Image (cartoon, helix red, strand yellow):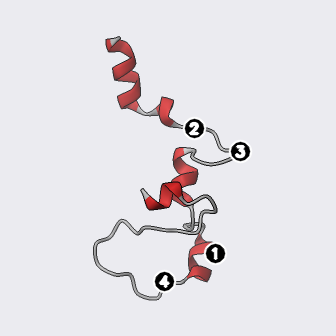
Amino acid sequence: MCELYCPVDALYVAPQVEPLESVDEKSLKETGLLGSYRNNIGWGRDRTNTAKQDSTHQILKQLK
């Protein structure tokens, strides 16, 4: 949740449990990972919210 709420995309939370080696801010920026989760789900200014594209949302919408 920290990565989602960071207003300046300054966080990257790796999906791996083990600490990543040789990962620094420069490499995260170069690979586009810094703030990528927020971007992918559409959180933040000037981004398209992707929640309605989620299959769970579509199923719940049909149950109403």
Residue 23, numbered circle: 4
Cα–Cα gap, marks 4 and 1: 11 Å
The residue most toward the bottom is 22
In this image, 30 relative to 60: left or right? right
Cα–Cα gap, marks 4 and 3: 28 Å
Please name the residue that numbered disc 1 is placed on.
30
The residue most toward the top is 64
Image x and y of residue 40, in percent: 54, 50
Ranked by sequence position, the earlier of labels 2 and 4 is 4
Give the secondary structure at mark 3: loop
Q: Pointer 3 and pointer 2: residues touching (CB < 8 Å)?
A: no
Give the secondary structure at mark 1: helix
Image x and y of residue 6, in percent: 55, 60
Cα–Cα gap, marks 3 and 2: 9 Å
Q: Quadrant of the N terminus?
A: bottom left
Q: Nearer the viewer, mark 4 or mark 3?
A: 3
Q: Residue at x 39, y 17 (%)?
A: 61
Q: Amino acid at mark 4?
A: Val
Cα–Cα gap, marks 2 and 4: 29 Å
Give the secondary structure at mark 2: loop
Ranked by sequence position, the earlier of labels 2 and 1 is 1
Q: Amino acid at mark 1?
A: Glu
Ranked by sequence position, the earlier of labels 4 and 1 is 4
Q: Residue at x 60, y 66 (%)?
A: 32
Q: Amino acid at mark 3?
A: Asp
Please name the residue that numbered disc 2 is placed on.
49
* As drawn, 18 above or below 54: below
Please name the residue that numbered disc 3 is placed on.
46
* As drawn, 14 above or below 19: above
Q: Nearer the viewer, mark 2 or mark 4?
A: 2
Q: Nearer the viewer, residue 53 or 12?
A: 12
Image x and y of residue 15, in percent: 36, 65
